[in-house]
Amino acid sequence: NFGQILFINPQGNKFQGTYSWSGGGVVNGQVNGQVFKGTYRDGNGTGTFKIIMFEGDTKWSGSYKSSDGNGSGAWSGTLISREPTKIGLGALQYLERSPKIMALRPIIFEDRSSPVPVLSCF
């Protein structure tokens, strides 16, 4: 279980987010329709991922691969809330302060005033 992941859509087709696994990490990327492609970074390193949304954007599945080639696998998630959480709001503030983070989102929202989705990842 990779813990919870929070995706937001700051602008256009770019997205960013945070997740709780491995002491916490960030994801960044681009979305094209229901397909999200991007990079991740956490205490164990960096890598790439691709996920595809389905069932009305309430579920997704895909894969990830570490940059060093030592880890890869399937990645899936289920929507557990469209409401911001206390942790989610803190993550959003962190992302807004970080100039190095580009941006990713699996559920599409037009602006930051929209609810932020929180996904449970497996």
Image (cartoon, rainbow, N blue to C red):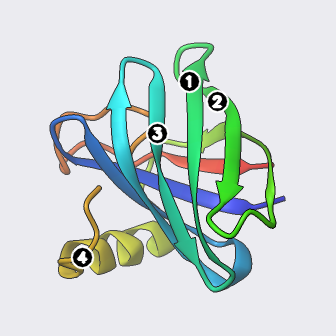
Give the mark, 2 or 1, whose residue is nearer the N terminus. Answer: 1
Q: On the image, numbered disc 3 is attached to which residue? A: 37
Residue situated in front as seen by the camera: 76 or 116: 76
* Residue occupying the point 18% across, 48% down: 113
* Residue occupying the point 84% across, 59% down: 1
- Marks 4/3: CA–CA distance: 18 Å
* Residue occupying the point 80% across, 62% down: 71
Q: Nearer the viewer, mark 2 or mark 4?
A: 4
Q: On the image, numbered disc 1 is attached to which residue? A: 53
Residue type for callout 3? Lys
Residue type for callout 4? Lys
Q: Secondary structure at mark 4?
A: loop
Instruction: Sort mark 4 into few (<14), some (14-19) or many (20+) by Cα contacts within 10 Å.
Output: few
Residue type for callout 1? Met
- The outermost residue toward the front is 69
Q: On the image, numbered disc 4 is attached to which residue? A: 100
Q: Is residue 36 left or right of residue 101?
A: right
Residue type for callout 2? Trp
Q: Which mark is residue 60?
A: 2
Asked if labels 1 and 2 touch by Cβ distance under 8 angstroms, the answer is yes
Q: Position of residue 89 (x, y in %)?
A: 37, 70
